């Protein structure tokens, strides 16, 4: 099965172009003000206009209200909405209202955390298994934290899914081999500091994906 990749938290034309040139299947734009990757409406619109039709645009949100989603949809021309810390009923309501593909983030530290995945059946289109960030962390994702990938070995996934959390060009092969992921998602692993993406690291990650 071929593996595809989402490069998340893009905020400049140069790094967005690197993701597109490296054949990313998805690009991610963050709409969460505490994040160093948060985009203004204007920047989101500028970036979205550069994305060719075969590359899917994913908006990243943390339990957003309707106004936040509508504003981002309008500016970012989003194909999919990635929801962190969002209850299944709210995810279903956003899906019904927007008609967009919904990715529900499930934060994982232990095997017990995986039980949340099934609660999104019927409410989301895809589960994004992400590492749980430390208690009190400013962000529920995007911190380069990984989880124990062996937890996904033999797990019965209730929906299509993707893997994220602390991925980088070096650990990608082990992550995919252990979990069987066919869609991987990276943010911190292609940065030189929080929020600052690096075109060379993006190219290296996507080359690693292509070499699997
Ligand atoms: O990137 C962010 O700032 C962010 C903010 C709020 C929720 C999620 C966020 N990022 C997502 O976190 C995962 C993992 O990122 P990393 O590779 O471990 O840095 C990824 O899906 C990002 O989209």
Image: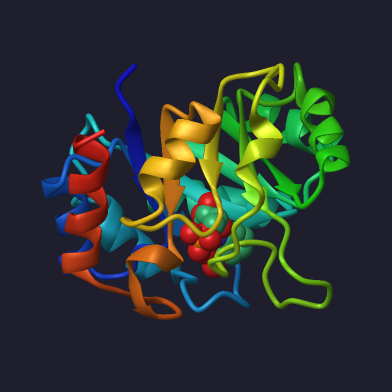
Which residue is at 55% across, 41% downward?
Answer: 81
Q: Is residue 71 above or below residue 184?
A: below
x then y, percent, for residue 32: 60, 67
x then y, percent, for residue 86: 78, 46
Which residue is at 77% across, 52% downward?
Answer: 109
**Figure quadrant, ligand 1:** bottom right
Q: Quadrant of residue 117?
A: top right
x then y, percent, for residue 212: 26, 33
Q: In the drawing, does residue 104 fall left or right of residue 56?
A: right
The answer to whether residue 78 shows anywhere in this view is no
Residue sitting nearer the eye, 155 or 9: 155
x then y, percent, for residue 26: 34, 40
Number of marks: 0
Q: Give the quadrant of the N terminus.
A: top left
Which residue is at 54% across, 32% downward?
Answer: 179
Q: Quadrant of residue 95?
A: top right
The answer to whether residue 87 shows anywhere in this view is yes
């Amino acid at each position: 099965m071929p593996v595809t990749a989402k490069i998340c938290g893009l905020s400049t034309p140069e790094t967005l172009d690197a993701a597109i040139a490296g054949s990313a299947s998805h690009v991610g734009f963050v709409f969460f003000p505490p994040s160093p990757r948060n985009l203004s409406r204007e920047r989101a619109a500028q970036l979205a206009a550069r994305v060719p039709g075969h590359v899917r645009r994913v908006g990243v949100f943390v339990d957003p209200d309707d106004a936040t989603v509508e504003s981002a949809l309008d500016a970012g021309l989003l194909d999919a909405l990635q929801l962190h810390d969002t209850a299944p009923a709210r995810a279903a309501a956003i899906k019904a209202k927007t008609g967009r593909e919904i990715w529900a983030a499930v934060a994982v530290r232990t095997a017990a955390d995986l039980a949340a995945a099934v609660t999104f059946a019927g409410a989301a289109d895809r589960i994004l298994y992400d590492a749980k960030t430390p208690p009190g962390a400013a962000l529920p994702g995007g911190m380069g934290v990984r989880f124990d990938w062996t937890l996904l070995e033999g797990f019965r996934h209730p929906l299509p899914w993707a893997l994220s959390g602390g991925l980088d060009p070096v650990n990608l092969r082990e992550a995919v081999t252990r979990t069987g992921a066919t869609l991987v998602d990276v943010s911190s692993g292609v940065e030189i500091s929080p929020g600052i993406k690096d075109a060379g690291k993006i190219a290296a990650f996507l080359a690693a994906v292509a070499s699997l």
